Amino acid sequence: MRLGDDWARRIRDELSRADAFVVLLGPGAAASEMVAAEVAMARDLRKAHGDRPRLLPVRIRIDSEDLIPYDLGAYLNRLHYVSWWGPEDTANVVAKVLAVLEADAEPPQPAQPAASPLRSVTTAPVRPPGAMDVEHWYAPRVEAERDADVYLADHGSPVVLVGPHQIGKTYMLSRLLTTRPARDSAVVRLNLSYYAHDTLKHPDLLLREIALDMCEQLDLDPDLLEDEWATALPPARKLTRYVQRSLLGAVDGLLYLAIDCTDVVALLPTGQDFFAMLRRWAELGRRAPWSKLRLLLAVSTEPHLLSTSIERSPFNIVQPIRLDDLTGEQVLDLACRHGLDWGEAHAARLMSVVGGQPYLVRLALYRAAVHGDSLETILRGANREHSAFADHLQSRLLKLQGDSALAAAVRAVLDDPGADVDFATMDRLRRAGLLIGERGSYRHRYPLYQQFFRERL
């Protein structure tokens, strides 16, 4: 490029004329905003031109996708790539890039993974969707993670993830907890749905169980917990003192405390005081040692429904982060990681039945990758007994059959979207991810559910 050139226009002109764009991505380039802008420019040009320029990523001494920022990785990580670790790899890299060009093959996109000699994004064994493997099967949620990072950078600002059942809250919590904490930080992860119902109902039992979980996860001296619990203080004061003295005092860096399914106690006698305790912890974050605490909460219930008093709620301190269905691009990303030869039409066809529900999408991808079923085969019998979705659908049916109010509401909406469904019942169905909409225009969240329940209820 010559001195005085309009570099932005020159780059666009060169990319618009190019048949291929070889992206040499080392750690420095991966962190460069200009590289990200050039990749985005090439992507937009390809959309406009239909087939060029082809993006051919070459990773230079990158051993983890965590080194690639999310806005850049959201696109590049789903393309096949080749790695360069030293001069001994040069001939191999050149040969593979030339092979793509000379064969006039399609670029290394999810729609054409088999045609490209470039290596797959992941060689991890395909695992069923219930298995928690964030490294290989998490679909990045760039905007949601960016919002979470803003809150995590500020003490006293809880991260509150909101979304229906199986929308990806637990996966995102795992992603944040495995990539954000520094080496000197500590992580405690709780899931209230794992606790016995009798424990959840009693303040002393619940908070002592939480304290035991914290003690075990951080490998702390249990005698300190026993000493704290022997005092005559109320349970919330006991746990607050224990967290301050034994947890925050034991870590050099930050303490990340994540509570999944926080809302399971909302309607129990313990719920409001538990939420008030979390609120107090967040407010204490403006001073030491509570400034070390980073609180992450995941709920399926609308935050404004959880606390009877806004002053005692930990869910309204900052704007909640709402998780929704996967986009078509995210579905293609996952399809590529499963080694599937899918394009945009495949993603659109799948989403016309299951939407972008992460669990249902992964069920279909797993069946296609492991059993070799075509997408049409998977969808043709989607609501049948031995389909990829059978176990999921049967579990939903069992829940409805065990609750006459829920079943009656689902049947009513099947017959009439304007059906009169009481507020509490509708909230439960929203949390379960079965129904969406507002009064007078309710509908089933996904066509798969509508078809299945119409036949079975």
Image (cartoon, rainbow, N blue to C red):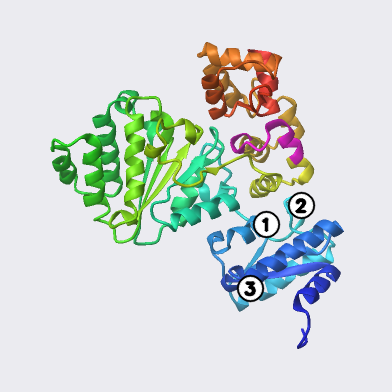
Q: Is mark 2 on a helix, strand or loop?
A: loop
Majority SS type along the magenta span: helix
> Is mark 1 in CB contact (under 8 Å) with mark 3?
no
Q: In this view, does 116 lie to the left or right of 136?
A: right
Q: In the rendered image, which quarter contains the C terminus?
A: top right
Q: Is mark 3 on a helix, strand or loop?
A: helix
The amino acid pointed to by label 1 is Tyr
The amino acid pointed to by label 3 is Asp
Q: Residue at x 69, y 18 (%)?
A: 418
Q: Residue at x 42, y 51 (%)?
A: 157
Mark with earlier residue (1, 3): 1
Q: Mark 3 points at which residue?
A: 89
Measuring from the top left, give residue 168's x and y in whole percent: 54, 40
Mark with earlier residue (2, 1): 1
Q: Give the range drawn in magenta.
A: 348-360
Residue 267 is at least partly visible in this image:
yes
> Label 3, label 2: how many angstroms apart (C-alpha)?
24 Å
> Label 1, label 3: how many angstroms apart (C-alpha)?
25 Å
Q: Name the residue under label 1.
A: 75
Figure check: 190 above or below 253 = above
Q: Residue at x 49, y 32 (%)?
A: 301
Measuring from the top left, give residue 20's x and y in whole percent: 79, 67
For residue 53, what is the image quadrant? bottom right
Q: Which of marks 3 and 2 is in front?
A: 2
**Residue 350 located within the stretch drawn in magenta:** yes
For residue 311, what is the image quadrant? top left
> Is mark 2 in CB contact (under 8 Å) with mark 1?
no
Measuring from the top left, give residue 205's x and y in whole percent: 25, 30
Q: Name the residue under label 2.
A: 112
